[in-house]
Amino acid sequence: MAGSEHKENNMEVTKIENVTRVFKTGKVETQALRGVSLSIENGEFTALVGPSGSGKTTLLQLIGCLDKPTSGRVFINGKDVSQLNRNQRADMRRGTIGFIFQFFALIPTLTAYENIELPMLLMGQSASERRERVMQLLESVDLTDRAIYRPDQLSGGQQQRVAIARALATKPALILADEPTANLDTPNGRQVMETMTRLNQETGVTFVFATHDPRVIQYAQRVITLRDGLIVENNIENKDEEKVSLEV
Amino acid sequence: MVQLLRMAFRDLGRNRRRSFFSSLALAMGLALLLLMAAFIRGEMGSAMESSIRLQTGHLQIRAQSYDESKTSLKWEDLVENPDQVAGRIATLAPVKVATPRLFATGIVSVRDETAGVRVFGIDPLSEANAPYREGMVDGEYLTADDRSGILIGQPLAEKLGLKVGDQFNLSVNTSNGDVDEQLFSVRGIYSTETNAFDNFTVFMPLAKAQAMTQTENHASTILVLLKDKAQTDVVAAALQSTNYKVLNWIQMNEFMTTYEEFANAYMYILYLIVLGITATVIVNTLVMAVFERTREIGILSAIGMKGRRIMAMFLAESSLLAVGGIIMGLALGYLAVTYFAKFGFYIGNMGITGFLISNTVYTDLTLEDAVNLTVMAFVITLLAGFYPAVLAARMEPVEALHGGK
């Protein structure tokens, strides 16, 4: 592993204890998660897999402090985030967690450069710090020449790479990706996954991504399978990073 | 802050036409209000100036017992030796002119037509009566020794079908309570461009008026015009006497002052209604923007933007819409006000008794009105932005990321 700016020890970056999440729509209750426990360590490259409705996205949202569990506890870097209020969760997300979404979640009025810069602006970093970091990230996702392009001037794959760079901007401990290749064709999907894998290896940042694409699952060191709101399989066979191939 | 404004500016630029028309709605509202404020200010200002110039002067000296509403002609209610009193007043440095006037009520009869009038007995040579002399549209102005001629206002002459040289009967009250009727000729027809005055006022020389009303060497008032209106209180204090009462132009135009206060209060309500309507347009625009950008709000929230900052972003958008609208509104309002200040706004005979509004109103926008309206427009637009801003700030990130509920 080349760089290790995030990976300082083998501590858990997130831990989930017997988490449930129930959604209410009128009088109808849907149990998205039914008592899930899980631990993810620093530097892991983990896939959450399972059919639609299995609870992958809900689990990512709880780990990402976008949502609160109905019961159970979620820890990020050892801190219980289950009962944080809206602002506290925003603070936690800003400094600790990066997001990559299925839709290319960039702000359409901002350039690639400005999209990557945005989380750092929210962190209150200086202009020179931001400039240096953005240029470094643009280079790492091979988009230096697209810095001043707006999202509608970029291909889907390029947009998703900008989203990856943005997720890394504040040097988070954890990056959560929800179906990052679902809207991409095969070559672009492969490029995105290769970028994520490389950055995981270079920087040591933990990646957890939800997918049901078998081509993507191959990249994962660890595969957690969910079904009907429960973890049915926790496959850590690929945890040895050397086994992860960059070729599909 | 700069980044916030930049984002807000670009967000507004996404739907330029919608943003432009929202700003334009505010601009039209503001321009309309500036024009209305300038119109009212011009109307009130000109009415006051007309009243001072044509009717009240800056000061009047009257007998203590004189009751204006009864147009009393009893000697004890009048000023004795008015020429002497006026002469003494005219020696004061701030006084431009002082002249006696006698007021009486009368009825003009021409064939089957009659009309109630106010008869002004004036010194034709006094500079205080220049507005009537300068307003002559036909015939001749009065001379001091004219014993059968009368000046009549143009609208009254038209109403009664009178021309220069025509004869008519005029009945007036006298000092002993009788009515005297005499035959007069139309010596001249005047117009002060103020129908409310011209319709009811006829002039005759003071000596003739005194003779007809049997008031001899008496006048209802000594009208004083000052070189500078600001000197009113100083001169009034200097003229205080136990024999007379001194009235200033504010006291004599109390109705107008009260009406102006009422009009101002009414205008404020109107301002709020117009700005409220334009604010609704801004609210609508921003609420649409919030719903269109729900997912983006979710993204911003996901990357750690707090609700407070999301709210600030939408408030920045409403501020920019307000600034755009205000700049356009000031420009439109300035053009409209300038046009009507130069060419006037013809309103015709809109006068109310005791309220001398010119037939043409010239707009007069004060800096105070412009600043007040601009600040009010900005604050109301900003307040209007609060609802969509709070709506955006309160969105749950998970729901927002999925495009809302």
Image (tube, rainbow, N blue to C red):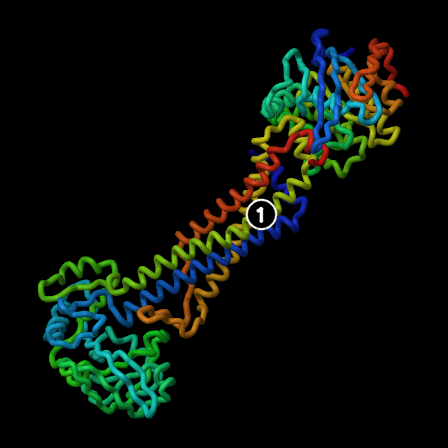
A183 lies above or below B41: above
Residue A168 appears anywhere in the view: no
Q: Which residue does the image show at 50% across and 46% down from the upper left?
A: B380
- What is the quadrant of residue B208 in the picture? bottom left
Residue at figure coordinates x 57%, y 36% from the top left: B390
Query: Where residue B230 sits: x, y (%)?
Result: 25, 58
Quadrant into which the C terminus of chain A falls: top right
Residue for point 24% across, 79% down: B105
Q: Neighbour class for label 1 at 10 Å: few (<14), some, many (≥20)?
A: many
Secondary structure found at label 1 = helix
In this rendering, would B323 be left or right of B124? right
What percent of the width, then of the height, locates residue B107? 27, 84
Q: Nearer the viewer, residue B2 or A51?
A: A51
Residue placed furthest toward the right: A248
Determine which quarter of the picture holds residue B350: bottom left
x and y percentages locating residue B399 in the rendered image: 69, 32
- Residue at image coords 56%, 49%: B280
Residue B380 appears in the figure: yes
Image-quadrant location for residue B395: top right
Q: Position of residue A31 (x, y in %)?
A: 75, 24
| Near-viewer residue (B342 or B281) | B281
For residue B94, side relative to residue A155 (left or right): left
Q: Which of these two is toward me, B311 or B46?
A: B311
Location of mark 1 (residue):
B282
- The outermost residue toward the left is B242
Q: Amino acid at mark 1?
A: Ile
